[in-house]
Amino acid sequence: MALWVWAFVGGLVGTFVMDVGARGLAKLGVNDALGGLLGRWVIGFARFEFVIDGHKEIKSPETLFESRLGVAFHYIFGGGGVALVYPAWFAYTDFAFPDNQIVPGLIFGALSVGLTWFLQYPCFGFGVFGRRGPEGSSTILPPIFLHSLYGLSIGVVLQTGLQVC
């Protein structure tokens, strides 16, 4: 049970670290094309609309509700929820659970970038890898870097948390 809790907590911490990294990249002028669209996308789920026109939607500022919904979704589902895939992988495969979580966590995070490239970007109308993203957006290296931070954070939290328990 502790493994699942620590993985979820690691996902929350990883999402926070990822957000801090994204803000840092934004200060350097690096745009990953996702800003402000997540909450608007999630609102569409209630209407069974899973694809938005990101090029059109990005032109109007996000509302406070969209911003808060996007943050909540990002942390709870995108952060904590996705992090549960990490222990599930070991629980439901023949792979042995590693003694050290740092490198496997980093690898998991780097692989999780697939959710951005193959789910989010296409659902925002930007295509696979975000190749049709807004002009000036960088959709390959920043997501790899940010998702690696996410996975590294999961690994660190798991390594630390499991030693405490």
Image: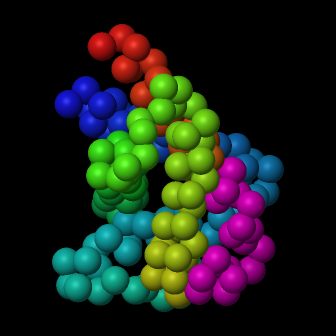
Q: Which residue is at a point 48% across and 33% down the rendered structure image?
A: 98
Rendering coords of residue 119 (x, y %): 47, 75
In the image, taking residue 4 as reference, residue 149 lies left or right, namely right
Pick the residue in front: 92 or 144.
Answer: 92
Residue 86, above or below 113: above
Regarding residue 109, the answer to whether it shows in the image is: yes
Question: Can residue 64 be seen from the camera position used here?
Answer: no
Residue 150: x percent and y percent?
54, 43
Question: Residue 72 at x, y = what percent?
Answer: 32, 51
Labels in figure, total: 0
Question: In the displayed structure, does residue 103 sit left or right of residue 52?
Answer: right
Q: Residue at x 23, y 85 (%)?
A: 48
Asked if the stretch drawn in magenta spans residue 153, the answer is: no
Image quadrant in which you'd find residue 117: bottom right
User: Please, which residue is most extreme toward the front here?
Assistant: 94
Looking at the picture, does residue 51 appear above or below residue 13?
Answer: below
Quadrant that contains the C terminus: top left
Q: Residue furthest top?
A: 164
Q: Which residue appears at 48% of the width and 26% of the height?
A: 99
The figure's colour scheme reads rainbow
Question: Which residue is more in the foreground, 75 or 58?
Answer: 75
Residue 104 against residue 62 in the figure, above or below: above
Within the image, what quadrant is residue 132 found in? bottom right
Residue bounds of the magenta highlight: 127-146
Quadrant of the image for the N terminus? Answer: top left
Residue 49 location (% of width, % of height):
29, 86
The answer to whether residue 136 is magenta is yes
